[in-house]
Image: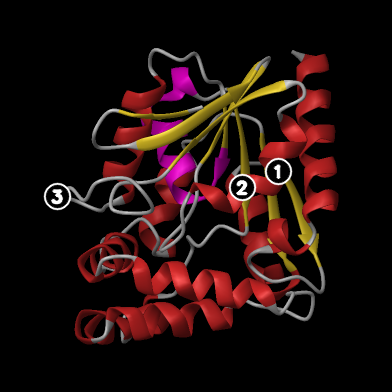
Amino acid sequence: MPYSDDRLFFTDAGSGQAVVMIHGWTCDGSDWAWLESALRADHRTIVPDLRGHGRSAEQDGYLPQHFAADIAGLLTGLGVSDALGGIIASVLAVAHPSLVQRLVLVDPAYGADPDVVGPMLPAVTAVPHKIALASLRAFYGEATPSWLPVWHARRAVGTPEAVVRDTFFGMYSPDGLGIRSVGEPYLRQRSQPMLVVYSGRNAEQAVWERSLNAATTVDVWDGYGHFLFQEAPATFAARVKEWLTAGAELA
């Protein structure tokens, strides 16, 4: 069933251990449809559209901390203890640890080199949709089905320009948590068990990820792009269910 508090749209379905699924930049909660359908049989799935994205209202502030605070407010009364996503799920785990028991992160976009993303900041200001589309194209791999970029592009150009721009700046401005030197000490504060799945194109970052938290399980999927959970939905769902089940048995 869909719900809304007039600012944040989300769906809440299924029963059992609750899992919140957090999408990324210029996307919306429908990114998780394939995984959600696989988990609903034995999990409660809570899937929001982030502020300014999808069906949720625009608001002031698009830092990862703003997004995480929205999710925390949503989940406080819902008893959610597992989060899937990337930097926003990580901020949620650090800032609101009582709400997050475990984390599954999908090819997270933190750990960026400021020399790479810094020159993009003026362009994002001038032509935000153009930069969003260029960034999406760089995310694809040999396993990407032809329809996926079409779907992503349509949603990206439908995201308000200010949201596209400010979300990117929130991640990659010089003091943004998406920058490796800034984010690293923050990310080390995550204490929850984590499964982090990287595409093969980010194998070097996967090595860095392992250095942040020794207990983290890091997978590298060769041949897949950033949206590996949509390129291989059945395989990804099976991996997540396996990891969640193993964690529940150890708890």
Q: Is residue 136 magenta?
A: no
- Mark number, residue 35: 1
136 and 206: which is toward the camera: 136
Residue 68: quarter of image:
top left
- Local secondary structure at mark 1: helix
The magenta span reads: 84-99
Horizontal arrangement in the rendering, residue 250 relative to residue 132 (left or right)? right
Question: How far across and how far down the image is residue 197, in percent?
Answer: 71, 53
37 and 221: which is toward the camera: 37
Question: How far across and how far down the image is residue 132, in percent?
Answer: 40, 77
- Local secondary structure at mark 3: loop
Residue at the far front in the pictured view: 1
Q: Is residue 249 above or below residue 136?
A: above
In the image, which is nearer the foreground, mark 3 or mark 2? 2
Q: Residue at x 36, y 55 (%)?
A: 177
- Mark number, residue 60: 3
Residue 17: quarter of image:
top right
Horizontal arrangement in the rendering, residue 156 relative to residue 81 (left or right)? left
The residue type indicated by label 3 comes to Asp
The residue type indicated by label 2 comes to Trp
Horizontal arrangement in the rendering, residue 90 relative to residue 52 (left or right)? right
Write down the residue under mark 2: 32
Asked whether the residues under the numbered discs 2 and 1 touch, taking CB atoms below 8 Å apart as contact, a structural biologist would say yes
Query: Does the rendering let one see residue 125?
Result: yes
